[in-house]
Amino acid sequence: MKRPSTISSCHQKGRISVHTVSSDFGPSKLNLYLHVAEESRFHWRRAKDKFILSADSEPQKGLILFHENKPDLIDLCWQQFEFDPDFTSFSSVEWNLNCHTDMVCVFAFGDAFWRAPTMAIQHRLIDIVNNIDKSRIFLVTETDEDKQNAVRFCKESQMCHQTHILRTTLDKHLLYETMYEILEKQLSSFVSDLKSRASTRLVHSFTSGLDILLGKLKSRKKRRQSALSKQCIARIKSGKDYGIVGHRLYGDALYIFEDADMSTDAQKTMEIKKSIKENFKGAVHFRSIRDSLSPHRALICGGSFRNSRNGHGGTLGIFGELTRVEQGASKQTKITVALSSGHVISANTPALVSTMGEIGECIWPLDSSNNIHDVSVIKIDQTRIDDLILILNQQILVGEISKEDLEDRYVFKFGATTGKTTGYIGVIDDFQMFGEEVMTILSRSECSSKFSDKGDSGAIVLTKISGRLYGIGVVYGGGLELSDCKNIREETIAVFLKRALDRFTDKTQQTIEFDKI
């Protein structure tokens, strides 16, 4: 998005300018809001072409910002709402006294305004809010003095509730909760509008997905409690040496993934499977991991690479520097490496690029078939260092991020097959493979392609938090075949990057530092 130098082109009346603001990356408390708003708006645009829908049923995303012709709206929205500067858009609004809206309206004025607002501006504000529900109006101020002056103004004018006058540095919980309440109301209206039509299969194709989104909004305040008891989880873990390699809770059904080749005692395996059924209140399905999960690997040209021994292809996810202490010396050496998915290539195997030939040799993992949670570490040949090309040229951070901050978060990746794709994190809880959690990612509804496909294994899953770029996952594959599960779109399975790197460091006593991607 091009950064504007001024906002002088926006519509002004009485020195007050109005913009709608929409962002893909914001505070973690808005993860679910941004996800549901984006998805429901896409479905509404599709549905309006097939049905005569009421304009009032269209879900909205973002907020309406009233300001004093600020010279930098991007900075204002970053400071006030943590909306990422690179993923926030603005549209000027020609506001008049007859305008109505069912979006949150935020008024952001500087200290000069609150110290001595002119009578003309005061009257203008009163006229503006005349047709806006007071529960939708918020004032944001920069200092305690500004807030006191704003409170005094609102007492006299009855412009908004005093609890809706906020400081920049304080929690915006009430503001964000109002955004959620509005979206839930709009989505309910949209679903009701559709369901009032003839009960046809075409209508159901829309409402089934929307009901899921609406359910997420309605249950957001409830403390999530897993249907898996501690006893059941203990039984699953006890099967580690008997072929039980993972599990996933999907609604009221529990799927257990097994690898028969890893079972050391068939009788013990049967006992554990029986015990799992006895400790779960619902249907339990046992699936072969080999038949259920398909790695995204293929012979790929261009920016991809391949395993020189078996031809498996993947994506060079990110470059970094491996720090190693030379034997017999305290001197540290740094070696350029590339990361990919652990199943594509393993140690002592040359990595090839079709247009360049051999680019280096894999040094980790020792066996790519043992654990889907590993990353491949490929030592880049020193003669190829000058050939490395960065995608974004932005610094990347790798750190432990809480589940709460990741759930429903907007993410993107660059893969050798599908290029740049965007999506949302779906499942983190109650889905494990080989004793560790994995994440699922769904592409955005507006995207015609999957989040990843064959050849994208190894692509780094990225997100932005507080304006900084984080690498959070590594694409493993997709195509999780569970006949009873009706996914909105095919999921991508990704492993956690931080945990994979920690495992590498623990086993090799070497660290990898990342600069830019």
Image (cartoon, helix red, strand yellow):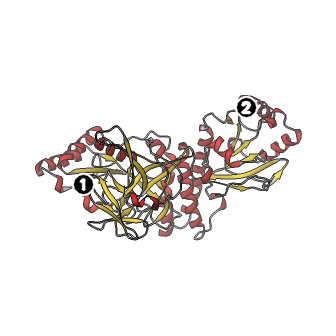
Q: Residue at x 26, y 66 (%)?
A: 309
The amino acid sitting under disc 2 is Lys
Residue 155, how many percent across, how many down? 78, 31
Query: What secondary structure is marked by label 2?
Result: helix
Disc number at residue 147? 2
The amino acid sitting under disc 1 is Asp
Q: In the rendered image, which quarter is residue 40 located in?
A: bottom right
Query: Which residue is tagged 1?
Result: 367
Q: Residue at x 59, y 38 (%)?
A: 173
Dot in front, 2 or 1: 1
Do the residues under discs 2 and 1 have CB atoms within 8 angstroms?
no
> Would you say 294 lies left or right of 6 here?
left
Q: Is residue 457 above or below residue 320?
A: below
**How far apart are the alpha carbons under marks 2 and 1?**
61 Å
Query: Callout 1 environment at 10 Å: few (<14), some (14 to 19), or many (20+)?
Result: some
Q: In the rendered image, which quarter is residue 480 located in?
A: bottom left
> Would you say 475 lies left or right of 435 here?
right
Query: What secondary structure is marked by label 1?
Result: loop
Query: Callout 2 environment at 10 Å: few (<14), some (14 to 19), or many (20+)?
Result: many
